[in-house]
Amino acid sequence: MTEPQPQQSWVKVFAPASIGNLGPGFDSLGVALEGLGDTIEARRIETPGVRIIEMTGEKENIPTDPARNCAGRAAESVLKQLKGKAAKEAGLEMKLHKGLPQGSGLGSSAASAVGGAVAAHLLFGSALGRNIRLEAPLAAEILGSGGRHADNLAASLLGGFTIVRSHEPLDVIRLEMPSSFRFVVVLPGMEIETRYARSVLPEVISLKDAASNWANTAALVAAVAQGKPADFGRAVVDRVVEPVRSKLVPGFSEVKHAALEAGAHGCSISGAGPALFAVASVDAAERVALAMQAAFQRHGLPGRHFICPPDNRGARRLD
């Protein structure tokens, strides 16, 4: 990521969408998606604090109050890291273009939080290490998900395939994602609140199901390291979270079956849903997307589909 330089002009930052809770990797695995994400423009102002002066795009139900907005809250967290006089006088205003709808399962709040934190970091030249750059948006992510969950944040900030080994203390491992992978994402016309999607999860699981998820998590990491999309797809098997959350998505079983019949290597829920993702080859991706979208439509849910290579760049300055 570009080194920060104190300045007065606008900076423009893009933070990519992501798939969190990747298959069996609940709260731990994530991957950044090319082409989808949020864009933040920000500049320094003389008035202390953070102001959001404009929001465009998928902005429905998203507040402009910085204290209640993920981008604003993350920027405020960065300003609190400043020292002395700068901490008291620091102020910025921002414009937020939402490329992701809220409650989509594609890391919408995480992309906003990461974009806000990176923009503030660039403007004020704060000497933040990687973990602090994650901690700032993590404070804001609580607004969206109700807890400290860094799987989407890590992927959006760092790009590639990320493993959150620990939240206390924060410990993230990043792997470069092979460019041959394709993620087919189908977003039906509905919303699932992340807090609610967490509330339905079981507090106790069987050892057999846990062992299956552990094995498939290891297989996902191996598939990334070896550059094998088919092996990656075969390891997208979740016996803990998917059976519960799939009940929140009308037609889930039929959509997943349609994806696999059309040639997908694997399919599961993206984040808390309602988006579903499939892993497919470049040649099969469009066919898989159309099959999934048609299956959703049979259940009265029109929607959108995206075919995304992995994003290995992560959050970045555009201007």
Image: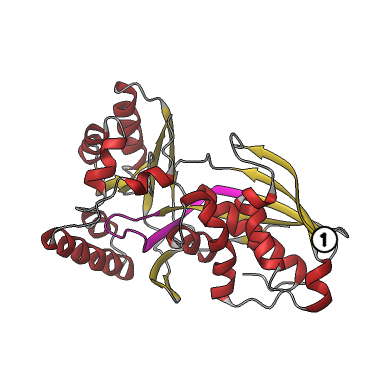
What residue lies at 88% left-to-right and 60% top-to-bottom?
46
Does 95 appear above or below 304?
Answer: below
Task: Kindly identify the amino acid type of the residue bearing the numbered disc 1.
Answer: Pro
What residue lies at 58% left-to-right and 42% top-to-bottom?
99
Label 1 SS: loop
- Foreground: 67 or 299? 67
Q: Position of residue 20 (x, y in %)?
A: 40, 55
Does 189 appear above or below 231?
Answer: above
The reply to whether residue 314 is visible in this rendering is no
Q: How many marks?
A: 1
- Answer whether residue 24 is magenta in the image: yes
Q: Disc 1 marks which residue?
A: 48
Packing grade of label 1 (10 A; few <14, some 14-19, many >=20) is some
- Answer whether residue 58 is magenta in the image: no
- Foreground: 67 or 227? 67
Q: In this view, does 283 lie to the left or right of 53?
A: left
> Which quadrant of the view contains residue 21?
bottom left
Q: Where is residue 131 in the image (x, y as percent from the top left)?
A: 54, 74
Tell me the quadrant of the picture where the C terminus can be found.
bottom right
Q: Give the range drawn in magenta.
A: 20-38
Tell me the quadrant of the picture where the N terminus can be found.
bottom right
- Foreground: 319 or 192? 192
